[in-house]
C-alpha cells in the first residue's frame, strides 16, 4: 500500500486531463508536453492536445536544437508573440515547421528525473496569449511536475520496497530470536547450580528441570519465529484462529515471569476482563502473541532497572471492552513500575533503530506497531510518570 502522497489513481490520465483542460482555458490550438534527455538530447512527446504535422516524428530529432532544449534543460521561460517577426525565428524553425504557430508560451516542468520536461502552448495567431494565460500555463506545468514526481516516487518505492522489507524482516528476526534464545538468567542459574554443588539433591534437580523447561519453551518460540518469517517471505501471513485471548496472555506472562521477573522479585499479574470472557476470539494468534511477548518483556526489563532501589516491582496486564460507533474494540493495558518515559519520546520509541538498551536492536516496538496496524488497531504510550512507571495501550477490533 502506497503512503498518502502517492495516492493518485491514474497518473497518465491526470496529465491528460491537465493538458486538455489547459487547452480549453487559454484557447490554445496545441498543448504539448515534451521530454528531453539532457545528455543524449533525445526528444519525445509525453502528451499532446491539438493538431500537429503528421510527419512530426521525422522532425523530432531536430527539436534538440530548438527552444525545447532551452526550456527543458536550461529551465528558461519562453513567451513569443509573433515568432516569424523575431530574430529567434531561426531557432524555432523546426517547431514552427511541425506545428505552424506564431504565439508560444513555454514553462519548464520541475521534476527529479533522468529526463527533463517542458510544457508548450501554441497558437497560429500573433499576440494570442495574455498575462493570465502565462499564469495558467505555469500553474499547469507545476501540477504536471507534481504528478510526474509521484510517478517517479512510485517507481522508486516499487524498486526499493523489497530491500526495505528485507531490512525490517532481518531486524525483526534478530530482535525476536535474541529475546528467545538468550535466556540469560536461566542459563546463568543452571551454571550456578551445577558448579556450586558436588551433589545434586531433589530440590536442585527440580530447579534445573524448571530452567530447562523455560529454555525448551524459548527454543520452541524461536522455531515459531523462524516459521513465521518463512511464511512471510512466501506471502503466507496466516489465517485467523479461534483462541482464548486471556489464556494466551496469561501463558505468555507466566513464561516471562518465571524466567525474567521472579529472580528479581518482580511479579507479573494478568487481570481478567470482568464483563465476559475472551474465549473463542478469532485472531492471528502467532502475531498477537509476538506483540504481547515483546511488550510484557519490555515492561519487565524496564522494571528491573529499578529493582536495585525498590527491591521489588510489578507488571500488570488488564483488559477492557470499548464501544465505538464503528463497533466493539478490545483495550489491553500493560503497566510497569519502571523509570518512566519522557513525553517527547512517546513517538520516538516507535522509530526504527531507537533504543535505550545497551544491546538493543531498536526494532521491538516497530514490529509491534506494524503487526497491530495489520489488525486495524493502534498501540501507543497511554501515560508515563518519571520514576513511577509507564502504561502501554493496545486497541484492536473484536467481532463480538
Image (spheres, rainbow, N blue to C red):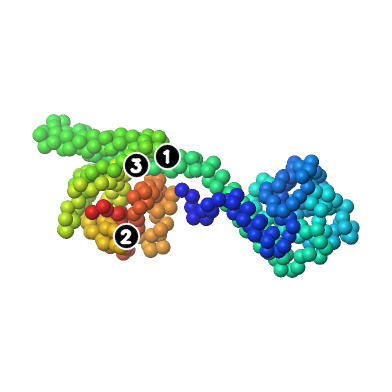
Per the image, the residue denoted by label 3 is 176
Residue 359: x and y, percent? 38, 45
Residue drawn at x 38%, y 63% as measured from the top left: 343
Cβ atoms under marks 2 and 3 closer than 8 Å: no
Q: Residues within 10 Å of mark 1 (few under 14, many from 20)?
A: few
- Nearer-N-terminus badge (2/3): 3
Q: Is residue 197 above or below residue 314?
A: above
Cβ atoms under marks 3 and 1 closer than 8 Å: no
Q: Nearer the viewer, residue 278 or 85?
A: 85
Q: Is residue 254 above or below residue 343?
A: above
Instruction: Give the distance between the C-alpha atoms of the residues marked 2 and 3, in whole angstroms.
Output: 34 Å
Instruction: Give the distance between the C-alpha atoms of the residues marked 3 and 1, in whole angstroms.
Output: 10 Å
Residue drawn at x 70%, y 66% as measured from the top left: 135
On the picture, is 370 further left or further right than 240?
A: right
Residue 104: x and y, percent? 78, 59
Per the image, the residue denoted by label 1 is 170
- Local secondary structure at mark 1: helix
Per the image, the residue denoted by label 2 is 326
Amino acid at each position: 500500500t502506497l503512503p498518502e502522497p502517492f495516492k493518485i489513481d491514474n497518473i497518465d490520465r491526470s496529465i491528460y486531463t491537465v493538458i486538455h483542460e489547459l487547452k480549453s482555458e487559454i484557447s490554445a490550438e496545441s498543448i504539448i508536453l515534451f521530454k528531453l534527455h539532457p545528455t543524449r538530447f533525445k526528444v519525445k512527446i509525453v502528451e499532446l492536445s491539438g493538431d500537429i504535422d503528421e510527419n512530426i516524428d521525422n522532425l523530432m530529432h531536430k527539436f534538440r536544437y530548438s527552444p525545447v532544449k532551452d526550456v527543458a534543460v536550461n529551465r528558461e521561460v519562453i513567451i513569443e508573440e509573433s515568432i516569424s517577426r523575431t530574430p529567434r525565428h531561426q531557432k524555432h524553425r523546426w517547431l514552427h515547421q511541425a506545428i505552424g504557430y506564431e504565439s508560444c508560451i513555454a514553462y519548464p516542468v520541475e521534476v527529479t528525473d533522468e529526463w527533463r520536461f517542458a510544457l508548450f502552448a501554441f497558437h497560429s495567431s500573433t499576440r494570442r496569449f495574455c498575462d493570465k494565460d502565462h499564469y495558467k500555463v505555469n500553474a499547469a506545468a507545476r501540477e504536471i511536475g507534481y504528478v510526474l514526481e509521484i510517478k517517479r516516487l512510485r517507481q522508486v518505492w516499487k524498486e526499493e520496497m523489497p530491500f526495505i522489507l528485507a531490512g525490517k524482516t532481518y531486524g525483526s528476526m534478530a530482535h525476536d530470536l535474541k529475546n528467545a534464545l538468550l535466556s540469560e538468567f536461566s542459563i546463568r542459574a543452571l551454571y550456578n547450580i551445577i558448579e556450586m554443588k558436588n551433589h545434586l539433591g531433589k530440590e536442585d534437580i527440580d530447579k534445573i528441570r524448571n530452567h530447562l523447561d523455560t529454555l525448551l519453551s524459548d527454543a520452541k518460540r524461536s522455531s515459531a519465529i523462524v516459521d513465521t518469517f518463512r511464511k512471510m517471505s512466501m506471502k503466507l501471513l496466516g489465517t485467523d484462529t479461534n483462541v482464548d485471548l486471556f489464556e494466551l496472555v496469561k501463558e505468555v506472562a507466566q513464561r516471562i515471569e518465571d524466567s525474567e521477573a521472579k529472580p528479581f522479585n518482580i511479579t507479573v499479574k494478568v487481570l481478567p476482563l470482568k464483563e465476559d470472557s475472551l474465549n473463542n476470539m478469532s485472531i492471528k494468534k502467532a502475531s498477537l502473541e509476538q506483540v504481547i511477548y515483546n511488550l510484557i518483556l519490555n515492561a519487565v526489563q524496564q522494571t528491573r532497572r529499578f529493582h536495585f532501589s525498590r527491591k521489588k516491582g510489578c507488571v500488570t496486564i488488564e483488559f477492557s471492552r470499548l464501544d465505538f460507533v464503528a463497533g466493539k474494540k478490545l483495550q489491553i493495558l500493560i503497566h510497569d513500575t519502571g523509570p518512566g518515559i519522557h513525553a517527547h519520546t512517546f513517538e520516538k520509541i516507535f522509530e526504527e533503530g531507537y533504543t535505550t538498551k545497551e544491546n538493543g536492536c531498536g526494532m521491538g516496538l516497530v514490529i509491534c506497531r506494524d503487526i497491530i496496524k495489520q489488525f486495524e488497531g493502534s498501540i501507543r504510550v497511554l501515560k508515563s510518570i518519571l520514576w513511577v512507571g509507564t502504561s502501554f495501550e493496545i486497541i484492536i477490533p473484536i467481532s463480538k
